[in-house]
């Protein structure tokens, strides 16, 4: 929000009564309002842009000759979860800001499900030191699936309304269709109180089409980031919803959706970009929002449209285009300099008028704060976990069971049935069908529940792996071929107060702590990526060939993504929002 002093200072500087702090001379301005690219200079005072007028001739304390590089607005990630990166907000800065991202719109539902409102406050204590802007999409579903899972906290109507009034809050976080199609008053009240503040409500309409989608949109939901097929994108645009085109670690949607936009001749005006869930390693290797921009251009989208999707489109969507999303007078000076606008690789990044990154590196690393002890003590097993905890009784030689089948590079799954062998009175996983055992262990010390199931397509051949992030309840999720190894990994994750573990042949071969809520590391980004590389190598020792095994593991349990989920209470029929038996036909 602009202060009186900022407005007055900007005007007086533009009138030449005082010098600018910085002049970026000799740039090619990518003007996302007019759709033009033209040579000019950019003048900055404090956090704000004073002028972009060619030949304005204003005085400046510092002048940077940009050598004819393209100047474009800082990029906006329209929807993401910090927790999925495994990095603290400070550590994440050191890898996303050099890629040109200066605003993150974060749904902190993961830490909220673990630690509630106080968890959100703990995450926000670093705001003033961050070299990017963190805006909050207030978590709408904590818990995500009431009655179908155990989680650590609740954000009801009053809590959501209180958080919505925080200065950083810009939207109601993603809401799945079951809350609306089942006409649940609590969630409709959250939407109404959000809209009454002239803020938007984010969607999560995976798999919904036709009249169901119409009903969903009629509630006031403004967008969806769960489109997988171009037909889904078109259906949402027709209903006045914006589409946030996602490219995460396991949710690779840019290629299919942007090809569809081209094939159907659609405008990009109501499209934005997001990452949703992306590991630090992938960000470092391929890029952040600049990857979405560059890949779209490679597919045939014109460069101006792609850059607008990453900037002004997102700012307009969140109704903050008066502050960010463009390089225009009075706006905050978030600026990327790049030798090319066809392949955006920033040579310099400015955030609120200060140079924060050069040539792919931070000017000054953002140091991770010390988080309070209580938020690093959130994993508590009510009962000891042993091999017997994963026993699934069966009779005869085989049993027919309901199975979650993974879909490559997507978080959606298929509900299939399979006939599995029975030995010594227990239903067994079957490597010949690529079916492993799957379980979710309650980790808040409340019930001690263990939900049991099977998954096809995880490619694990032996041993087990576990993770304390399992969307959105964030109990401990474990996949394996041997009950004893599954028990070992769960015990190790609990000992670490959250994290990863891999076991083979009765021993832990590698583990990695994630103590902040059992979701994030206190370590710098480079160390987290080094440790994650080690965990991925350990996962390969089990025979797993998935490109992002732990990200995949974290999404298997999600009880709001079709067709099946699994929680500490058991298997969930997502579309009907109910628990179902493991045995098929029972």
Image (cartoon, grey):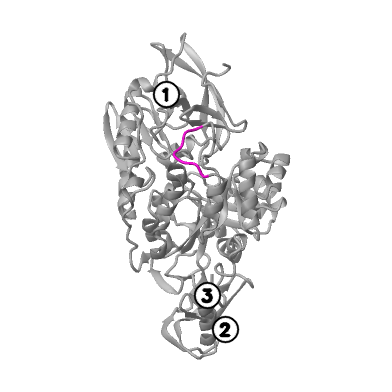
Of tags 3 and 1, which is closer to the observer? 3
Give the image location of residue 221, x and y in percent.
65, 49
Disc number placed over residue 3 in the picture, else none: 3
Residue 391: give x, y in percent of width and height. Answer: 40, 19
| Placement of the N terminus among the 4 image quadrants | bottom right
In the rendered structure, which segment of residues is drawn in magenta? 149-155
Which badge, 2 or 3, comes first in the chain's sequence?
3
Query: Distance between the Cα atoms at labels 3 and 1?
Result: 64 Å
The mark nearer the N terminus, 2 or 1, is 2
Tell me the SS state at disc 2: loop
Q: Is residue 280 magenta?
A: no
For label 1, the SS is: helix
Residue sitting at x 42%, y 49%: 119
Q: Residue at x 49, y 62 (%)?
A: 103
Provide the residue designation for mark 2.
53
Residue 431 numbered tag: 1
Spot occupied by residue 461 in the image (x, y as percentages of width and height): 38, 28
Q: Is residue 275 placed above or below 450 in the rendered structure?
A: below
Please tell me which of labels 3 and 1 falls first in the chain. 3
Indicate whether 544 appears above or below 344. Answer: above
Residue at 27% of width from left, 26% of height from top? 506
- Is residue 292 visible in the rendered image? The answer is yes
Badge 2 crowding class, 10 Å Cα cut-off, few under 14, some 14 to 19, many 20 or more, is some
């Amino acid at each position: 929000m602009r202060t009186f002093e900022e407005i007055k200072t900007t005007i007086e500087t533009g009138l030449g009564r005082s010098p600018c702090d910085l002049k970026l001379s000799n740039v090619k301005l990518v003007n996302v309002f007019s759709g033009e690219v033209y040579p000019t200079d950019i003048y900055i005072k404090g956090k704000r842009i004073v002028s972009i007028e060619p030949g304005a001739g204003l005085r400046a304390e510092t002048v940077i000759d940009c050598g004819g590089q393209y100047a474009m607005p800082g990029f906006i990630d329209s929807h993401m979860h910090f927790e999925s990166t495994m990095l603290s907000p400070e550590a994440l800065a050191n890898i996303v800001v050099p890629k040109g991202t200066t605003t993150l719109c974060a749904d902190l539902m993961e830490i909220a499900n673990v630690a509630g409102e106080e968890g959100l406050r703990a995450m926000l204590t670093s705001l003033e030191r961050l070299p990017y802007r963190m805006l909050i999409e207030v978590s709408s579903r904590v818990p995500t699936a009431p009655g179908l899972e155990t989680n650590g906290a609740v954000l009801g109507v009053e809590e959501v309304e209180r958080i919505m009034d925080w200065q950083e809050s810009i939207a109601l976080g993603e809401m799945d269709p079951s809350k609306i199609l089942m006409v649940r008053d609590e969630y409709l009240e959250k939407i109404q109180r959000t809209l009454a503040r002239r803020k938007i409500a984010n969607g999560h309409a995976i798999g919904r089409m036709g009249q169901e989608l119409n009903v969903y949109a009629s509630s006031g939901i403004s967008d969806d980031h769960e489109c997988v097929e171009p037909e889904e994108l078109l259906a949402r645009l027709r209903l006045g919803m914006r589409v946030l085109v996602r490219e995460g670690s396991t949710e690779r949607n840019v290629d299919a959706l942007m090809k569809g936009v081209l094939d159907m001749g659609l405008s990009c005006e109501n499209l934005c970009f997001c990452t949703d869930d992306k590991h630090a390693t992938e960000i470092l290797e391929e890029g952040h929002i600049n990857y979405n921009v560059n890949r779209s251009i490679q597919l045939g989208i014109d460069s101006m449209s792609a850059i607008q999707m990453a900037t002004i489109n997102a700012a307009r969507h969140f109704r903050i285009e008066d502050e960010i999303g463009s390089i225009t007078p009075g706006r905050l000076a978030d600026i990327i300099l790049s030798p090319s606008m066809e392949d955006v690789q920033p040579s310099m990044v400015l955030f609120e008028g200060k140079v924060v990154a050069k040539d792919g590196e931070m000017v000054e690393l953002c140091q991770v704060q010390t988080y309070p002890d209580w938020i690093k003590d959130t994993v508590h097993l009510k009962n000891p976990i042993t091999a017997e905890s994963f026993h699934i009784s069966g009779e005869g030689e085989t049993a027919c069971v309901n199975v979650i089948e993974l879909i490559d590079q997507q978080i959606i799954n298929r509900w299939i049935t399979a006939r599995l062998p029975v030995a010594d009175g227990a239903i067994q996983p079957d490597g010949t069908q690529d079916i492993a055992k799957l379980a979710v262990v309650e980790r808040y010390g409340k019930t001690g529940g263990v939900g049991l199931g099977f998954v096809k397509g995880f490619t694990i051949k032996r041993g087990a792996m576990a993770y304390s992030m399992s969307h959105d309840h964030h109990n401990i999720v474990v996949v394996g071929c041997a009950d004893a190894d599954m028990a070992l990994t769960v015990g190790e994750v609990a000992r670490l107060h959250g994290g990863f573990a891999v076991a083979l042949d009765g021993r832990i071969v590698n583990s990695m702590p994630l103590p902040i809520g059992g979701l994030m590391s206190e370590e710098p980004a480079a160390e987290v990526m080094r440790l994650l590389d080690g965990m991925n190598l350990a996962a390969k020792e089990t025979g797993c060939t998935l490109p992002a095994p732990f990200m995949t593991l974290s999404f298997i349990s999600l009880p709001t993504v079709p067709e099946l989920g699994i929680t500490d209470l058991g298997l969930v029929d997502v579309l009907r929002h109910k628990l179902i038996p493991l045995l098929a036909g029972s």
